[in-house]
Image (cartoon, rainbow, N blue to C red):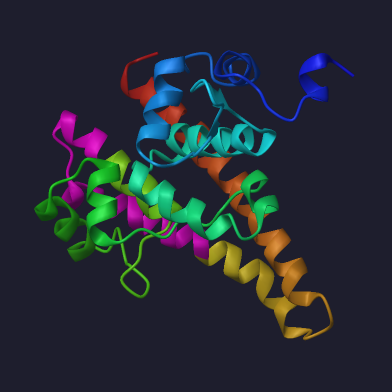
């Protein structure tokens, strides 16, 4: 066992060394900023040095992953952290994203008018006034497409294609669900996920072929 592992506390430099392999851009200033925002609360030695534990490292990994993978604002991450502290093991797992309207606008960088347009055209439908991870992906992607002059009204065909592909999934899992046997719902979910992935791969390949054809390649 290393001397670092044997001790109960670590310095900020040691924490940085643990995080760098997964998060190459993290800095001491970033860790201090997250502390200043109240997301982590390391103890202090009598001389004022921060004393980090392995739980702090896990919390930092969680925060940095949420920022990197889900683009969540810090206040949303802080709220999720507060709920997760009661069950620390959850910090290592993937948490369900549930955003308010204001949080989605901030995380996706959208204007309220754009979000309203997405909802009007059926590209986003909140559940109990909350938006999930896929809603955030849709919002951010539409925001990126807007740079090319493509807006919600232009994307109805994409939504229609997705609904048709969903029909294929429903058609496939319907016989499984009709069995009403123990484990049928889990089996249907697994089949739906696998089939969805295959359809996504097929869709992407066909789109690339069509684009190459349009470019005369």
- Return the residue nearer the eye: 167 or 120: 120
As drawn, is 43 to the left or to the right of 55?
left
Q: Where is residue 112? Give x, y as percent.
A: 13, 54
- Decide: is 83 above or below 157: below
- Residue at left offset 68%, top offset 27%: 9
For image coordinates 38% across by 38% down, the residue present is 71
Residue 212, percent from left and from top: 40, 20
> For residue 214, what is the image quadrant?
top left
Nearer to us in this view, 149 or 206: 149
| Total number of numbered discs in the rendering | 0
Residue at the extreme right of the image, as rendered: 1
Residue 118 falls in which quadrant of the image?
A: bottom left
Which residue is pictured at 21% across the width and 61% down the height? 121
73 horizontally vs 117: left or right? right
On the rendered image, what quadrant is the N terminus found in?
A: top right
Tell me: residue 103, above or below residue 92.
below
Is residue 115 within the magenta segment? no
Main SS of the magenta part reads helix
The stretch of residues the image draws in magenta is 143-166
Eyeballing the image, is 207 above or below 90?
above
Where, quadrant-wise, is the C terminus in this rendering? top left
Residue 119 or 34: which is nearer the viewer? 34
* Residue in the foreground of this view, choosing between 144 and 205: 144
Pinpoint residue 98: horizontal percent, then vertical percent.
42, 60
Vertically, is 150 above or below 212? below
Q: Position of residue 72 (x, y in %)?
A: 38, 43
Name the side, left or right, on which 27 lies relative to 87. Answer: left
């Amino acid at each position: 066992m290393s001397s670092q592992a044997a001790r109960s506390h670590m310095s900020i430099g040691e924490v940085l060394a643990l995080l760098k392999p997964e998060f190459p851009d993290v800095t001491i200033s970033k860790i201090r900023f997250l502390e200043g925002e109240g997301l982590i609360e390391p103890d202090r030695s009598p001389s004022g040095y921060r004393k980090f534990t392995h739980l702090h490292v896990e919390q930092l990994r969680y925060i940095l992953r949420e920022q990197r993978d889900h683009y969540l604002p810090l206040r949303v991450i802080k709220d999720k952290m507060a709920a997760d502290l009661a069950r620390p093991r959850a910090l290592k797992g993937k948490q369900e994203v549930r955003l308010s309207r204001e949080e989605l606008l901030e995380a996706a960088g959208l204007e309220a008018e754009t979000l309203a347009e997405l909802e009007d055209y059926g590209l986003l439908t909140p559940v109990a006034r909350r938006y999930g991870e896929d809603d955030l992906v849709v919002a951010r992607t539409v925001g990126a497409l807007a740079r090319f002059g493509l807006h919600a009204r232009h994307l109805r065909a994409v939504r229609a294609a997705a609904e048709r592909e969903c029909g294929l999934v429903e058609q496939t899992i319907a016989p499984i669900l009709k069995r009403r046997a123990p484990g049928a719902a889990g089996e249907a979910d697994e089949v739906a996920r696998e089939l969805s992935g295959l359809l996504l791969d097929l869709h992407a390949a066909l789109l690339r072929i069509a684009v190459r054809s349009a470019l005369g390649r």
